[in-house]
Image: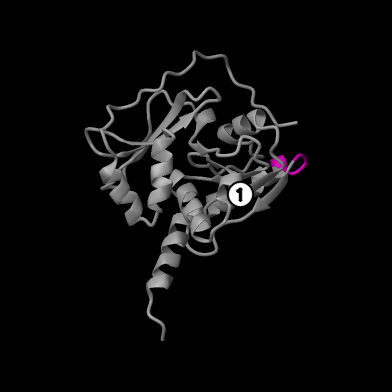
Amino acid sequence: VVQKFTVKEREPKTLELPKLHPDIQRVKMYLTGRGIDERVIDYCHKEGLLFEDDEYHNCVFVGKDEEGIPRYGALRSTTTDFKRDLDGSDKRYSFKICPNECAEILHVFEAVIDLMSYITLAAKARSEWYKDDYLSLGGVYATDKKQDIPLALNSYLESHPHTKTVRLHLDNDEIGRKAAEQIKEALQDNYTVCNEPPKSGKDYNDYLQNQIRKRKEPER
């Protein structure tokens, strides 16, 4: 049985997407510059999960509900450190890639770019990445109390009964490590939970870029 939240009744949120640019060229340039495979970017765009906003050319990451309706959106600047959730975003439907409706394994990340970095690494290793599902939590928080299952993860597990294993790829910092341990404790009675942070760097994008640099270094 998945742990449930007790929340106050509220009006359904209406996601406010910005005006979208006809293409995603600047977004693609930014993401490939961070090591993301172009095929992963194109896949997300084709699935309606990634766009470019018309005014500022930010990345627009979209999360959909079970009916395929956009319910969550996050902006990430392609030129600065600016990032925020869009007005009307519902955290229960954070960004996710679900190529297999009967997937037994779920990979969990703090941020979308880390999720895309992990798939890039898996694709380069010729892994059958499309057999699993992937979820971004849109960030985690630190607490000294027992942590509830994050909204996005709770919502995913409720709607994906085939899930057996949850692999946590949260950041290599104090907040990420603590959140991973707390989430593992909350889920371990019902799922196999694996704590798998990146082997180097703060997050999976750092790790991806480290691997790219290593491949480019001349042999001594």
Q: Is residue 17 left or right of residue 135?
A: left
Q: x and y percent of residue 156 in the render?
A: 60, 33
As drawn, the residue found furthest toward the left would be: 55
Considering the image in quadrants, where does the N terminus appear?
A: top right
Location of residue 211 with respect to 106 vertically, above or below:
below
User: What's the residue type where badge 1 is placed?
Assistant: Leu
Q: Quadrant of residue 133?
A: top right
Q: x and y percent of residue 25 in the render?
A: 27, 44
Location of residue 213 with respect to 54 vertically, above or below:
below
- Residue 107 visible, this orientation: no
Which residues fall within the magenta stretch?
A: 186-190
Location of residue 26 with respect to 1 vertically, above or below:
below
The residue sitting at 61% across, 45% down in the picture is 131
Instruction: Decide whether the magenta segment is chiefly helix, strand or loop.
Output: loop
Label 1: state its secondary structure.
strand
The residue sitting at 37% across, 51% down in the picture is 38
Q: Quadrant of residue 135?
A: top right
Q: x and y percent of residue 104 in the render?
A: 68, 42
The residue sitting at 41% across, 32% down in the picture is 48
Q: Is residue 129 left or right of residue 20?
A: right
The residue indicated by pointer 1 is 168
Considering the image in quadrants, where does the C terminus appear?
A: bottom left
- Residue 161 visible, this orientation: yes
Location of residue 87 with respect to 42 vertically, above or below:
above
Q: x and y percent of residue 202 in the render?
A: 47, 58
As drawn, the residue found furthest toward the bottom would be: 220
As rendered, which of 47 and 60 lies closer to the eye? 47
